[in-house]
Structures are given as C-alpha cells and as structure tokens.
Amino acid sequence: MTNVNKKYLDSSLKNEIWEEFLKKIKTAHSGSDLQTILLENFTPNEIIVLEKRLGINFLLRQNLKYREIQQLLDVSRATISFVKGGLKKKKKQARIKKSFSHSSSTSFSKRKNALLPPRGRGRWSFLYE
C-alpha cells in the first residue's frame, strides 16, 4: 500500500472535487464507461482495493460469515472488521508524560533498594557461592 500525505484538503476545494467526480460517474451509462472513468482516476491496485471493500460491504449485507467473505475475496478478517466498522480508525491518544512527585519517587527507590543487595564491592558475590 502506498503512503499518503496526511495533510487534509480545504473543505471547499474537497467539496468541488467530489462534485466533479460525482458528475463524471453520473455520465457513465454502462459498466465499461464506469471502468474507463475509474481507470482515468485510480491505479489498478486502488481499483482492486475499492472492489474488495465494496464487495465486503455487499457480502456483509447478504449475511455471509467472515470466513466465507475471506475465501471469496481473499481478504483478512481484520480488513472485514475494518470495513464493517465504517473504515474508521480509532484516534490515537497522545501519551501523557507523568511527572512523579518526590514522595512517589522515594517510595519507588526504597522498594528498588529493598530488592538489591547493599552497595559496594562484592555485593553480587552471593551469586557465585
């Protein structure tokens, strides 16, 4: 799959683009006309992805099971779930850096030191006995 720039288009420009694309699709009077329009705008791989996603939606509406859809379209279970969920990815939440207060860091260091032998030369010698 190709990488896509995450920069979004201006909403008015995006609406104009979709309106123009919709007009092109409305001019198609047959499957071959539609195929010509799609080939003008999409790569063969993008058309395959589109066909499979449309196929997943169609077969889910026919109440087929995931396993049957997997076999018919050669797609993964994750892809079927992704399409069924409306192609919505969960937004990643930014990690919040927690700053530990002095009291929590001292309690951690006390627990850590309780697990280690005392400092100094020979403190690991018990391992060799």
Image (spheres, rainbow, N blue to C red):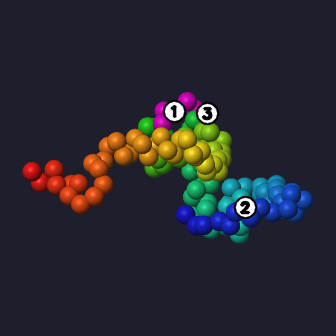
The location of residue 50, given as percent across then percent down, is 62, 54
Q: Residue at x 34, y 42 (%)?
A: 114
- Which of 101 and 47 lies nearest the eye of the viewer? 101
- Relative image position of residue 44 (x, y in whole percent): 59, 66
Q: Which residue is mark 3?
A: 61
Q: Nearer the viewer, residue 112 or 25?
A: 112
**Along the line of sight, the residue nearer the viewer: 49 or 108:** 108
Residue of label 2: 33
Mark 3 surroundings within 10 Å by alpha-carbon count, few (fewer than 14), some (14 through 19), many (20 or more):
few
Residue 72 visible in the displayed image: no
Local SS, label 3: helix
| Mark 1 closeness class: few <14, some 14–19, many ≥20 residues within 10 Å | few
Magenta region, residue range: 62-66
Q: Which mark is residue 114?
A: none
Disc 3 and disc 1: Cα gap in Å? 8 Å
* Identity, as a three-letter code, of the amino acid under mark 1: Leu
Say which residue label 1 marks: 64
- In three-dimensional space, the C-alpha distance between marks 1 and 2, rounded to whole angstroms, equals 30 Å
